[in-house]
Amino acid sequence: MIDRIILGIDPGTNIMGFGLIHQKGNSITYISMGVLKLGSHTDHQKKLKQIFDKTLALIDEYHPDEVAIEAPFHGKNIQSMLKLGRAQGVSMAAALFRSVPIFEYAPRKIKKSIAGSGDASKEQVAKMLERILTLEKLPQQLDATDGLAAAVCHYYQRDLTPEGDRYTSWKGFANKNPGRLSK
């Protein structure tokens, strides 16, 4: 039976979101989520150090078996994309420092795996996570649910059943697993 903890990270240079789930067999349970706020710092290198330190602290506290991280998206502002890539790289370096495997997912892939559409809003993704994980309350900062979404996306992408069935769409998954979506 599969038994693993997945840490999901939504990298950012102003806010880094993170979430953790525990997979036991074919079910997942919520462990924790939160954000690291970096907006008060003007020194980009200090922000990167804080991202590294926070990622290490999460790994040391929860001992995840795998890290799922949101990939930088192609935006119009090249400087923002470069900074975001650095934030992602620092999180990845922290996971590598602790020998935790890393899996990268495009933002559209994460949204589609959670909400059924790659164009879903942060609010739609958060609401679906609330339902999937029976969360009591959503956080004010939806960057936390974005980190959690990366972890859940990773769960959906790998080893969905003991037989290793793969699904090519949300509808295909829902049709073959009606009991897992009934809450």
Image: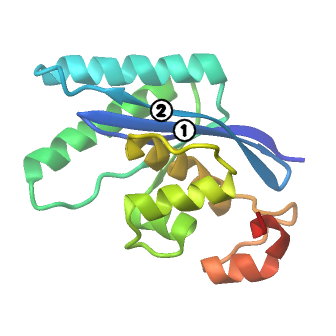
x, y percent for residue 2: 83, 46
Q: Amino acid at mark 2?
A: Gly
In the rendered image, is residue 106 in sight? no
Q: Amino acid at mark 1?
A: Gly
x, y percent for residue 170: 62, 77
How are the colours assigned in the image? rainbow
Mark 1 highlights which residue?
19
Asked whether the beta carbons under mark 2 and mark 1 sit within 8 Å of each other, the answer is: yes
x, y percent for residue 72: 30, 52
Mark 2 highlights which residue?
34
64 above or below 113? Answer: above
Residue that appears at 65% across and 23% down: 62
Residue that appears at 75% across and 49% down: 28
Q: Who is closer to the viewer here, 173 or 163? A: 173
Instruction: Identify the residue at the far right of this view.
Output: 1
x, y percent for residue 12: 29, 39
Query: How many numbered marks, from 0 up?
Result: 2
Q: Who is closer to the viewer here, 110 or 146? A: 146
Indicate the secondary structure of the residue bearing disc 1.
strand
Residue that appears at 66% across and 24% down: 63
* Mark 2 residue crowding within 10 angstroms, few (<14) / some (14–19) / many (20+): many
